[in-house]
Image (tube, helix red, strand yellow):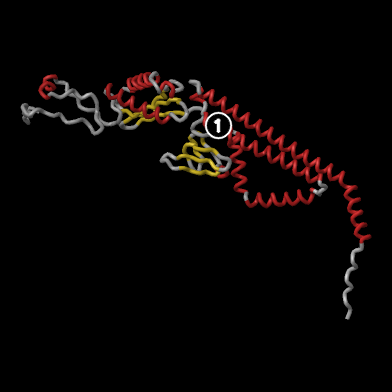
Amino acid sequence: MSTATPPAAATPDSLSRTASQAGSWVDDNWADWLNAGLQILLILVIAIVLRSVVRRTISRLIDRMNRGAEAAAATALGGLLVNAERRKQRSEAIGSVLRSVASFVILGTAALTILSVLQIDLAPLLASAGVAGVAIGFGARNLVTDFLSGVFMILEDQYGVGDVIDAGVASGTVVEVGLRVTKLRGDNGEIWYVRNGEVKRIGNLSQGWATAVVDVQVGVHEDLDRARAVIVETADTMSKEDPWDEFLWEPVQMLGLESVGSEFAVLQVQARTMPGKAAPVARELRWRIKRAFDREGIVITGGAPAATVTDPAAVAAEGAPVAQGAEENGPAPVQRSASVPPPAAGEQ
């Protein structure tokens, strides 16, 4: 049975020889180490300084954009055309994207440069990073789609805070615009969180101008020219009063006769308004037209005309006014006084 031979004890000569070899190896390579260390330090300093300068420049540019929007919103006309909060959120989102991209590009380039200084082969690393990126992209494709869609929505200014939009899956007023999710306030006060990647089409009801359309239904036997003149006069008076003079961007147009039925005729009125003000303008215009028609005795709804009492003596005896137009449910019956007996059958 053989036994293992114990290692020979290190002699002083071997120890001194190993130490001298290590010292010579350090002496031969210290210059390369120092050179690489200085290069890495210089790369880090340049990357940090460049990143700080770029981010500060982007922040100053965003602040200047916000100040310009606030100054424009402070003017009389700018307050109507410029949404300061919308501009602020849009610029902040763009600034965040630009700062993130700048940091990624600068620090990523610095890291690759440092690895090349350390003489590390980057080909396997880049190949692995590519495979990992593809795997992450497939796993988080919805997140990537939402992010890219949000970036393009913001850059193209498709909508902003305060806009009323129809995003297909939901509609309402934009409360917040994010890179991944857009927050909407519905008509009933509910909050909708819409992923940007799910939005296939957007209808913005707050850009440019809006149109208020009012259909006025009058009796088929009414004088249409007279009704048209009353509508035009009412609309002209409304356009000169506050705040409707700011909401109406063009004179109210009388489009004409929209449709005719057996008991009614429909006149259509159109007004170009400030974005988001079409509904209140239409409601106010209907209100004023109704009051004007009541003053002029024009029947708004169709129906048989009311009977008119032409005998002044009968009017005095009855104490009732002469009917001016048809009511919705037909003419009201004549109320006779108790002191005046009804006519006999032979007198009718």
Q: Is residue 257 left or right of residue 102?
A: left
**Residue shown at the point (89%, 66%) measured from the top left:** 9
**Residue shown at the point (20%, 27%) measured from the top left:** 307
Q: Regarding mark 1 in the picture, which secondary structure is present there?
A: helix
Where residue 16 sits in the image (x, y, percent)?
92, 57
Crowd around label 1: few <14 · some 14–19 · many ≥20 (10 Å)? many
Near-viewer residue (161 or 18) = 18
- What residue did someone put label 1 on? 88
Near-viewer residue (71 or 130) = 71
Where residue 179 sits in the image (x, y, percent)?
58, 40
Near-viewer residue (137 or 28) = 28
The image quadrant where one finds the N terminus is bottom right
Q: Is residue 224 left or right of residue 273?
A: left
**Residue shown at the point (37%, 29%) measured from the top left:** 283
Near-viewer residue (235 or 11) = 11
Q: Is residue 262 left or right of residue 52?
A: left
